[in-house]
């Protein structure tokens, strides 16, 4: 009997041990869950607090940004309104010409206001000046002194996309980068020396406009009338002339490298002298004597003004009695001091060729005695400085 009881008591002990272990495990899980929940509550509160703080900060930033935008807008409107009122009163009380102080005052006031205004109001300021006839060039006058000079003005990023009349607009030397004049009439307008990279003239009428020496990289002239336009010495790299009308255009010394244009565009052009073509090659190179009054000439001619004399009086002499050609020399042959003649030669129409490193020149002359000739090459008519070369007997 004892062995029988011992036989059945072992499973009961195991079951009891299992139940006890299970209860202990359940208790441990419960304790861990309690601990985890206890820890998560402040963590969730912390995360929620952080989210709320970030949202509040973002809302406060947006509020400050909106307030700043409103303040900037009010400031821009105040500057623009004061400017218009001031200039309008001046125009009503004075006849504005280049000879009086009014036009100088308007220029100073305009440049100062443009630096402070946003893009939209810069556009309205431009329209105001044009409609006030301060930016309209009278091509019938050789020297128009009633046009406001805005050289250096910041007109970048202005966009005029509605049909607008800007005929005879005068904006030489201004900054018009990333601007646009779409569907506009700009007949006989002048933009010489302006910086106009990435400008858009799509569907505009530019008959007879002047873009001499302008920087027009990546300019958009698609579907634009460019008849009789001057791009003399302009930079037109990667400009788009798709479906543009280029009849009679002057591309003298223009840089057209990478421009989108056809052979027809080039054939229609009036002048391509010294221009770099889209493929990098050069059109017809002007090969001529750039020195004025430097060749043999008849004795009936006098030494012309381009030559500057130094150290002696220089006159023309007949080679010999049977010759019609003359030379120039020292009037006082007893003088032993070095004698110079000097001339400045403008090579602006060769600037693209020079900048590309492909320009060559030959400077020669027939000299005797202690005489020399100096030539200074310059590319800017306003600044007559540049490379100087000298030749003489020695």
Image: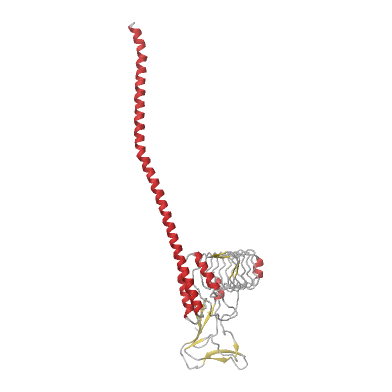
The outermost residue toward the top is 1
* Residue at 47 percent of width and 78 percent of height: 104
Report the front residue among 224 and 346: 224
The outermost residue toward the left is 2
Report the front residue among 146 and 190: 146
Q: Is residue 388 visible?
A: no
Q: For residue 318, which quarter of the picture?
A: bottom right
Report the quarter where the N terminus lies: top left
* Residue at 64 percent of width and 66 percent of height: 244
Q: Is residue 55 visible?
A: yes
Residue 2: image location, x then y, percent: 32, 7
Image height of 24 relative to 236, above or below? above
Image height of 306 relative to 22, above or below? below
Residue 90: image location, x then y, percent: 48, 77
* Residue at 41 percent of width and 56 percent of height: 64
Residue 364: image location, x then y, percent: 55, 81
Callout count: 0
Image height of 391 relative to 239, above or below? below
Residue 277: image location, x then y, percent: 60, 67
């Amino acid at each position: 009997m004892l062995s029988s009881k011992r036989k059945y008591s072992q499973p009961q002990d195991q079951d009891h041990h299992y139940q006890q272990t299970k209860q202990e495990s359940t208790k441990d899980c419960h304790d861990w869950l309690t601990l985890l929940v206890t820890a998560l509550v402040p963590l969730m509160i912390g995360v929620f607090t952080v989210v709320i703080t970030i949202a509040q900060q973002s809302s406060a930033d947006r509020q400050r940004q909106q307030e700043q935008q409103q303040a900037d807008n009010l400031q821009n409107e105040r500057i623009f309104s004061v400017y218009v009122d001031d200039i309008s009163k001046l125009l009503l009380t004075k006849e504005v010409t280049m000879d009086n102080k009014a036009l100088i005052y308007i220029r100073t006031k305009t440049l100062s206001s443009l630096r402070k205004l946003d893009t939209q109001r810069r556009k309205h300021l431009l329209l105001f000046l044009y409609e006030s006839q301060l930016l309209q060039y009278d091509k019938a006058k050789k020297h128009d002194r009633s046009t406001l000079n805005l050289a250096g003005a910041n007109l970048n990023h202005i966009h005029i996309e509605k049909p607008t009349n800007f005929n005879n607009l005068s904006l030489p030397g201004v900054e018009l980068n990333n601007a646009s004049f779409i569907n506009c009439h700009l007949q006989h307008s002048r933009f010489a020396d302006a910086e106009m990279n990435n400008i858009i003239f799509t569907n505009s009428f530019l008959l007879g406009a002047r873009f001499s020496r302008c920087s027009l990289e990546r300019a958009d002239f698609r579907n634009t009338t460019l008849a009789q336009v001057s791009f003399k010495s302009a930079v037109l790299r990667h400009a788009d002339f798709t479906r543009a009308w280029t009849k009679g255009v002057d591309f003298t010394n223009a840089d057209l490298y990478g421009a989108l244009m056809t052979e027809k565009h080039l054939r229609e052009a009036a002048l391509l002298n010294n221009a770099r073509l889209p493929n990098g090659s050069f059109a017809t190179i002007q090969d001529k004597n750039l020195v004025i009054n430097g060749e043999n000439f008849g004795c009936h001619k006098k030494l012309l003004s381009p030559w500057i004399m130094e150290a002696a009086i220089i006159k023309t002499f007949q080679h010999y009695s049977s010759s019609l050609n003359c030379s120039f020399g020292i009037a006082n042959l007893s003088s032993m001091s070095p004698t110079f003649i000097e001339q400045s030669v403008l090579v602006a129409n060769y600037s693209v060729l020079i900048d590309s490193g492909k320009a060559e020149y030959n400077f020669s002359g027939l000299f005797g005695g202690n005489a020399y000739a100096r030539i200074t090459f310059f590319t800017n008519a306003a600044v007559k400085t540049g490379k100087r070369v000298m030749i003489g007997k020695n």
